[in-house]
Image (cartoon, grey):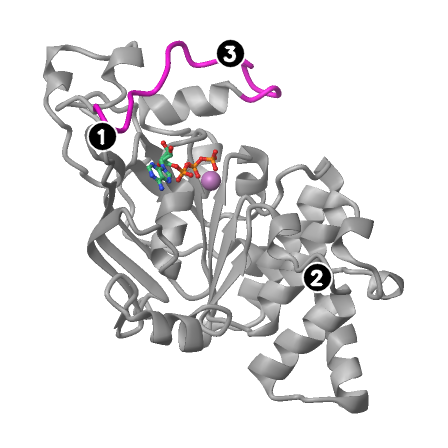
Amino acid sequence: MTVPPPVLSVRGLSVRFLMPHGRPVAAVTDARFDVLPGECLALLGESGCGKSVLASALLGLLPGNAQTAGEALLGDLNLLTADEGTLAGTVRGRRIGLVPQSPAAHLTPVRTIRSQLGEVISELKGIRRGARLQHAVLAAAGRAGFPEDHLDRHPHQLSGGLAQRAATALALVGDAPLLLADEPTTGLDRELVDRTVDELRRHVDARSGAAGHGLLMITHDLAAAERIADRVAVMYAGRIVELGQADAFFGGPGPRHPYSRRLLQALPDRAFTAIPGMPPELADLPDGCAFAARCERATGLCSTRPPMTDGISCHHPHQGPEAAPYTLTRKGADRA
Ligand SMILES: Nc1ncnc2c1ncn2[C@@H]1O[C@H](COP(=O)(O)OP(=O)(O)OP(=O)(O)O)[C@@H](O)[C@H]1O
Ligand code: NI
């Protein structure tokens, strides 16, 4: 079976923030990964490691002091060099659906959810008014599990969970080939986390083959990632340090990078031990491995930067599974 072309292909993406006083902030450095049709890739890492900056770069939403390098290909379009007209007119909402980090901030405060959904449906689907539009609004709300009897409320009248559902409903309207979810489960209780990520998963599973949709989910909720991800990428201090199959990462073999291991061990239902120390300043990164100062495996070797080899960037990785050929296990399909 041939692997279909990726929905998104990120090649050497770096983002620097130029600071008026002081050294540039290296928020993302040399990120490389693909999102395949039918796949959910979870991007994991502690607060401040560069996850949202990476997402903003893909959407063309970086502030003016940001400089980017590398490529992020959505089909033939390089998102990093595309002009704002293209991004606003054809990419955001249409080719990339965004489930934002803080839905409350993303929703328009003075308008009801019905009117916001209606507007986006008119714009993206060309359904202008009348019964067809109302029908489409109901369908869109339903897809995200947003209750019909709350459609006439304003965002401030919604709980955090329902605001999240409204934002998810808006993100799904365009039926975009790539869904980008930045902390889609922040502030939700476990049951709502499960329901939200299952909805995202369903979006990915709704199509198959080369027409499939991809999901890039940014999260520090490892349980949510375990539930829906096919593969995981772990970011530390702006770099992806591990990229591999979710089953191996969360299962028996476990993560291979010492940082990823500690991240999992920090979970309450695992060892619940915090990682000692702090990540380095992104304006003052060491030349070698950025995790070395906190790593029990570090040796003199770690003062040089470990190359990314077979999905792992570490001089002393834990034993992983046999380097398997690239496979896509398709969690959702297995479950169906
Ligand atoms: N406009 C900016 N100018 C300078 N530095 C910035 C700017 N925006 C973000 N940063 C820095 O980039 C780094 C990465 O931030 P980012 O928001 O991507 O983290 P994150 O991994 O998404 O964290 P969280 O999990 O808290 O959302 C942070 O150190 C942040 O301070
Ligand atoms: Ni973030």
Asked if the stretch drawn in magenta spans residue 268, the answer is yes
Relative height, residue 60 to residue 42 (above, below): below
Upstream in sequence: badge 1 or badge 3: 1
Sequence-first disc among 1 and 2: 1
- Which residue bears the numbered disc 3? 273
Q: Which picture quadrant has residue 233? A: top left
As for residue 264 lying within the magenta part, the answer is no
Q: Is residue 147 above or below residue 22?
A: below
The disc placed on residue 144 is: 2
Q: Does the residue labelled 2 lie within 8 Å of ligand 2?
A: no
- Name the residue located 40 percent from the left edge and 9 percent from the top edge: 276
Q: What element carries label 2?
A: loop
Q: In which quarter of the image is the N terminus?
A: bottom left
Q: Vertical placement of 95 versus 62: above or below?
A: below
Q: Which of 325 and 193 is in front in this view?
A: 193
User: Residue under circle 1?
Assistant: 21
Prevailing secondary structure class for the magenta stretch in the rendered image: loop
Q: Which residue occupies the foreground of this view, 96 or 25? A: 25
Q: Which of marks 3 and 2 is in front?
A: 2
Q: Which mark is residue 182?
A: none
Q: Does the residue labelled 3 lie within 8 Å of ligand 1?
A: no
Three-letter amino acid code at disc 2? Ala
Amino acid type at mark 3: Thr
Question: What stretch of residues is rendered in magenta?
Answer: 267-284
Element under disc 1: loop
